[in-house]
Image (cartoon, rainbow, N blue to C red):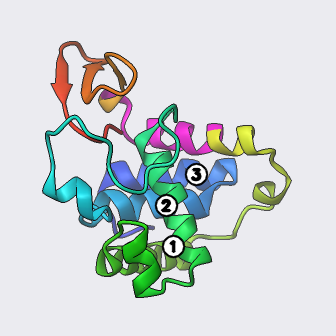
Amino acid sequence: RFPVHPRLGRMITEGERLGVLNEAALVAGILSERDIRLDARSRLHRESKPVGFTRATCRSDLVEILDLLHQAREARFDTDRLSDLGLDPRAVQAVERTRRQITRLAAEPSARHDHQDPWEHEEGILIAILAGFPDRVAKRRMRGSIEFICSAGGSAPGLTCQ
């Protein structure tokens, strides 16, 4: 039903089932398009924190990027405001375009979204991501570190981990 990679399709379908279709569609856009954070693209393996990140203790880098996209929406995608947030306006627009296309193809928006508390809502997003990418789960070796311990074994450097 969705013209995306099967992993993304699985994630979107699970997001739809859990009532977090909009966020699952945004994550699909994040993973399909180039990184929306200007700083992340220019400093791939540096230890410093990317511009715009607000929650250093967030359970998922993708949830932090979702927060940035919500800030972009609140700014009405104004180019100057996006730049102030450290976001690439073109990449943000591409992610938003992907979200709109996916949600348009969805059978029916779920009513559960409006009745979830924030914790339950974030859990739904994380479960949807896990459904599409169960082999790519990792945790940071130490708080603030860019090194991850992968669920499949081993470790990997990087700024984001699904």
Please name the residue that numbered disc 3 is placed on. Answer: 15
Query: Which sits earlier in the primary sequence, circle 1 or circle 3?
Result: 3
**Disc 1 and disc 3: Cα gap in Å?**
22 Å
Residue 145 position within the rendered picture, expressed as x and y whole percent measured from the top left: 30, 25
Q: Quadrant of residue 95?
A: bottom left
Does 120 sit above or below residue 105?
above
In the rendered view of the protein, which quadrant contains the N terminus? bottom left
Figure check: 129 above or below 13: above
Q: Which residue is mark 1?
A: 72
Magenta residues? 123-135
Residue 44 as seen in the image, left or right of residue 60: left
User: Disc 2 residue type?
Assistant: Leu
Q: Residue at x 32, y 56 (%)?
A: 31
Which residue is at 35% across, 16% downward? 142
Left or right for 131, reference 38: right
Q: CA distance from mark 3 to mark 2?
A: 19 Å
User: Of the residues tagged 1 and 3, which is closer to the observer?
Assistant: 1
**Which is more toward the observer, 119 or 49?**
49
Distance from label 1 to label 2 (Cα)?
Answer: 6 Å
Inspect the magenta stretch and tell me whether residue 88 lies in it: no
Circle number at residue 68: 2
> Going by the image, does 76 lie left or right of 28?
right
Horizontal and vertical percent for residue 143? Answer: 40, 21
Mark 3 and mark 2 in contact? Answer it, CB < 8 Å: no
Q: Name the amino acid, label 3.
A: Gly
Residue 42 % position (x, y): 14, 57
Q: Is residue 34 left or right of residue 85?
A: left
Disc 1 + disc 2, Cβ < 8 Å: yes
Residue 106, position as x, y percentages in the image: 57, 70
